Image (cartoon, grey):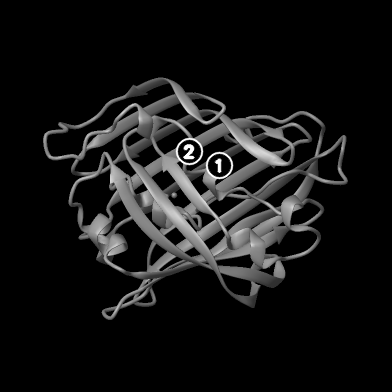
Amino acid sequence: MMFHLRVAQTTILATGSALALMTAALGDHAHAEGKLDASYTISFAHIRVGDIAATGVFGESEYAISARGRAGGLMKVLVDGEASFATHGTIKDGYPVPTTFTSKIVSDAETSDVTMVLDEGSVKELAAATPPKSDRVPVTQANRQGIVDPLTAMLFSAAAAGEGLSQDVCRHTLPIFDGQQRYDLKLAFKRMDKVTAEKGYAGPVVVCSVSYEPIAGHRAYPLVKYLSEGREMEMALAPVAGTRLLAPFRMLVVSALANLVIEANQFEVTAQASTVADPKAQ
């Protein structure tokens, strides 16, 4: 999640904005917390061009997620720079509801800082250092309602789909607002698969196809066109042990030139004490 293009969160979306990332209620651990530590590599044409590190802490009624990453090298024409993201929220009826979101993106082209306060899916306060908007699609008040931030968008409630991996977790349209851009990620079930991390998880995943639809706040960045022009994308979701959570394990963007892949090399879950803390303080 960590590109100078704010739609980086989209690619990160497997993370990858890594995409950091997880999903819904902690099920049987009523008085405990789970912590997910995940690291992702970004590769293009089988060449490593970036990294993402993500941490999520999930309690019975609260969650906190942070992600930090960088990208560049051969990908400089599409993404270049580094970024950090953090979100905090509550868990209601098994679903994550964000209350705050912050991001900072730094690149050769520009630097941006965003701080959002949310209430039941609507933006109540927004402080954003934005570049000139004359060439951007205007963001309306309606675009700031019924949304989730890029990190919370990566939280999928397995509770609604029953026990184990289910095709139903892919049947979602994610309405995302990052403080500057509003876009949809449309998911659909594609297949079941198996994965193995270098450190941590090995086992089944559910793979969703993903389509990216820019709505407002964007301009014709190379990556926006790259992702929205009928590009084939998919995201693999892995279970978070001991919880009813699913987290992005891998993101694939198919291209005739070369594939862009964001994949976890670490995906580990540990039990924590009973108070959710900001992952940045871990």
Q: Residue furthest bottom?
A: 256
* Residue 197 appears anywhere in the view: no
* Above or below: residue 212 compared with residue 215: below
The amino acid type found where label 2 is placed reads Asp
Picture coordinates of residue 212, whole percent (x, y): 37, 57
* Above or below: residue 2 compared with residue 60: below
Q: How many marks?
A: 2
Q: Are marks 1 and 2 in contact (CB under 8 Å)?
A: yes
Picture coordinates of residue 144, whole percent (x, y): 40, 30
Residue at the spot 31% in from the left edge and 45% down from the top edge: 215
* Residue 31 appears anywhere in the view: yes
Picture coordinates of residue 229, whole percent (x, y): 26, 65
* Above or below: residue 156 compared with residue 217: below
Residue at mark 1: 152
**In this view of the protein, which residue sits in the foreground, 252 or 2?**
252
4 sits to left or right of 192: left
The amino acid type found where label 1 is placed reads Thr
Mark drawn on residue 164: none
Residue at the spot 88% in from the left edge and 46% down from the top edge: 28
108 sits to left or right of 167: left
Residue at the spot 63% in from the left edge and 77% down from the top edge: 193
Residue at mark 2: 149
* Quadrant of residue 35 within the rendered picture: top right
Q: What separation in Å lies between label 1 and label 2 (alpha carbons)?
A: 5 Å
Picture coordinates of residue 169, whole percent (x, y): 64, 59
Q: Within 10 Å of the Cα at label 2, are there few (<14), some (14-19), or many (20+) other Cα atoms?
A: many
Q: Residue furthest left?
A: 134
Q: Secondary structure at mark 2?
A: loop
**In this view of the protein, which residue sits in the foreground, 228 or 47?**
228
